[in-house]
Amino acid sequence: MQGVLESRGASAGSGLTERQGVVLEQALRLLVDGGEKALTTAGIARAANCSKESLYKWFGDRDGLLSAMISYQASKVRTLDVSAGALDAESLRRHLVAFARDLLDVLAGDVSLALNRLAIGQASREGSKLGHMLQERGRRQIGRRAGALLEAGRKAGLLAFDDGEEAYGALYGLVVSDWHLRMLLGEEPSEMKKGFSRRAERAVDAFLTLYGKKG
Amino acid sequence: MQGVLESRGASAGSGLTERQGVVLEQALRLLVDGGEKALTTAGIARAANCSKESLYKWFGDRDGLLSAMISYQASKVRTLDVSAGALDAESLRRHLVAFARDLLDVLAGDVSLALNRLAIGQASREGSKLGHMLQERGRRQIGRRAGALLEAGRKAGLLAFDDGEEAYGALYGLVVSDWHLRMLLGEEPSEMKKGFSRRAERAVDAFLTLYGKKG
DNA sequence: TGCGAACCGTACCGTACGGTACTGACGGAG
DNA sequence: CTCCGTCAGTACCGTACGGTACGGTTCGCA
């Protein structure tokens, strides 16, 4: 067990060989296509041209595989930090609209929806470990980007709020409303994506009405 | 098949005998306690003291049983319509806060959470029939109450909006934000319920800032 | 060339589920 | 009393899954 060399370069420093990355990729594809029901160890092994025994050696058990899938996906969609230098009212609005649009796009992505469905289906069981992971690696991550943007807006005298978390909550609610839940329940995302741009702008307008400093 | 008498009075005119109501009650309890994994036909039969054969005779198959559970629960939590006679600014605000608090309470209810988890887990499969049912019987229902309230507010000259659906979406988003998803992912609802009242008031204040007519 | 580790493919095992079939008990109708 | 429908309880069947074990193959390495 000690001194094991990774057969090729590890991917993204996650401690994963690229072989294991391929496995997780195929597992995600299966999950997106057929839901949790289609995510069987035999199916993953077949799709990734590996043996079940290797799956258990690499990931321990099925739960370990699910956790690895979430970590893997989270590491892939690293949010690009916006360099928020020298904000004025118009550039702040543009940044907020871009954030809102990105948020809607991420939430409507089929991998995101599939992983959220998976974690939610698992949440009733004890632990809800997957839910915590998704929360930590997803919301926390994108929340930090929004928080930084809001803070920059306040520093520039363009926004007024006491509680940053509350302001972020309002922005999130105005942007997303119940669309995320509706997509999780099966409403066709492609139908909704067309209205995302307009929706993002409206939501940001409302947010600025609430938290923007008049001037 | 014809002329079958229901052995006792049907419950709520749903075409269900009270025996079947007991079965659905037990099924919901199992679902809340143990999640979808615990919702097996054998388990339901044992909990309700009936035979599996009767389950299949009454509900057809497992999907029919799940649908019946949603219908049954939806018929139980009929939303009380508020008689919105003679609104002024203060009573409108009270009504909105009451609505917001009720909304949060409903969404945080364990039966609601369990059914939403069930429908979401099922949504990846074809059809997403349960998702549609939950959408129709849940959101549509409570949305009508909110829509009527908003419309009354506009008629009374207290609110200003063009698109009622958009205004409702903003209210919903401000009230709920991402709390529903977080609870679905397993965050403990009892921890959150304490802040519901304050949260409802804050959200309504923001909503009135956006859509309330000044004066 | 020979050794050993990793690994694929498959077979295998125990279990649990959805759904069906059978038996026996109850209870009402004639 | 007898017939008949309903239902509980249980046994049963086919299937599918998670997890393990084994034979055969490739490949790095000495």
Image (cartoon, coloured by chain):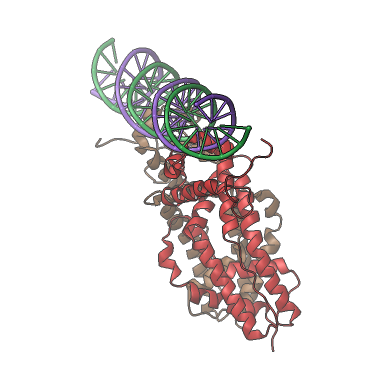
Chain colours: A brown, B red, C green, D purple
Quarter holding the C terminus of chain A is bottom right
Front in this rendered view, residue B62 or B116: B62
- Viewed as shown, does residue A132 lie left or right of B152? left
Q: How many marks?
A: 0
Q: Is residue A141 above or below residue A114?
A: below
Residue in the image at 67% along x and 85% along y: B88
Q: Where does residue B12 sit, x and y in percent of width and height?
A: 61, 55
Quarter occupied by residue B87:
bottom right
Quick one: quadrant of the N terminus of chain A?
top left
Residue B112 higher or lower than D4, as above or below: below
Q: Would you place residue A128 above or below residue A175 in this image?
A: above
Q: Position of residue A111 (x, y in %)?
A: 55, 46
At x 45%, y 44%, the residue is: B48
**Residue A213 horizontal side relative to residue A18, left or right:** right
Q: Is residue A35 left or right of residue D17?
A: right
Q: Picture coordinates of residue B81 (x, y %)? A: 65, 69
Q: Is residue A106 visible?
A: no
Residue B75 in view in this figure? yes
> In which quadrant of the rendered view does residue B170 lie?
bottom right
Q: Give the image location of residue B123, x and y in percent.
A: 58, 45
- Residue drawn where x is 68% and y is 54% of the image: A192
Residue situated in front as seen by the camera: A183 or B59: B59
Furthest residue in direction bottom, as rendered: B215
